Image: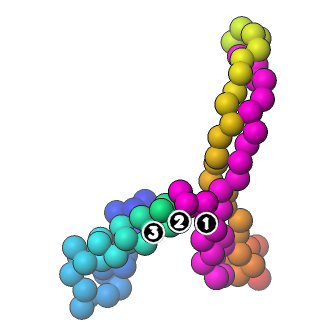
Amino acid sequence: MIRSELIQKIADENPHLYHRDVERIVTTVFDEIIEAMARGDRVELRGFGAFSVKKRDARIGRNPRTGEPVQVEEKHVPFFKTGKLLRDRLNGR
């Protein structure tokens, strides 16, 4: 499902809301998750999962084309851990 499909589904299920308001709500939720992660905070949505940021240390990597060693800088990457309810639904329980 992509963002526009999510917005359309929510708008269809809530005919009392304007489409532009649903779009603003979805955008606000995603923006807040992004802002929290940018600050290094953890975002937990009970039953769904938790978003966090993990730090990857600098290291010496390898160029796959030439085999030449390259310096890979330290970076922060997003990480998602599923919640128990989501895991159980995916596994048919």
Q: Amino acid at mark 2?
A: Ala
The residue tagged with tag 1: helix, strand or loop? Answer: loop
**Cα separation between marks 3 and 2:** 6 Å
* Up-down relation of residue 82 to residue 47 (above or below): above
Residue 33 percent location from the top left of the image: 50, 67
- Using a 10 Å C-alpha cutoff, classify the residue at mark 1 as few (fewer than 14 neighbours), some (14 to 19) or many (20 or more): some
Question: Which residue bears the numbered disc 1?
Answer: 41
Would residue 1 be visible to someone looking at this image? no
Question: Which residue bears the numbered disc 2?
Answer: 36
Q: Which contiguous range is marked in magenta?
A: 37-63
- Contact, CB < 8 Å: mark 3 with mark 2? yes
- Contact, CB < 8 Å: mark 2 with mark 1? yes
Q: Amino acid at mark 3?
A: Glu
- Using a 10 Å C-alpha cutoff, classify the residue at mark 3 as few (fewer than 14 neighbours), some (14 to 19) or many (20 or more): few
**Cα separation between marks 1 and 3:** 11 Å
On the picture, is 3 further left or further right than 91?
left
Q: Residue furthest bottom?
A: 16
Question: Which residue bears the numbered disc 3?
Answer: 32
Name the residue at 70% across, 53% down.
54
The residue tagged with tag 2: helix, strand or loop? Answer: helix
Residue 70 percent location from the top left of the image: 72, 17
| Viewer-proximal residue among 1 and 20 | 20
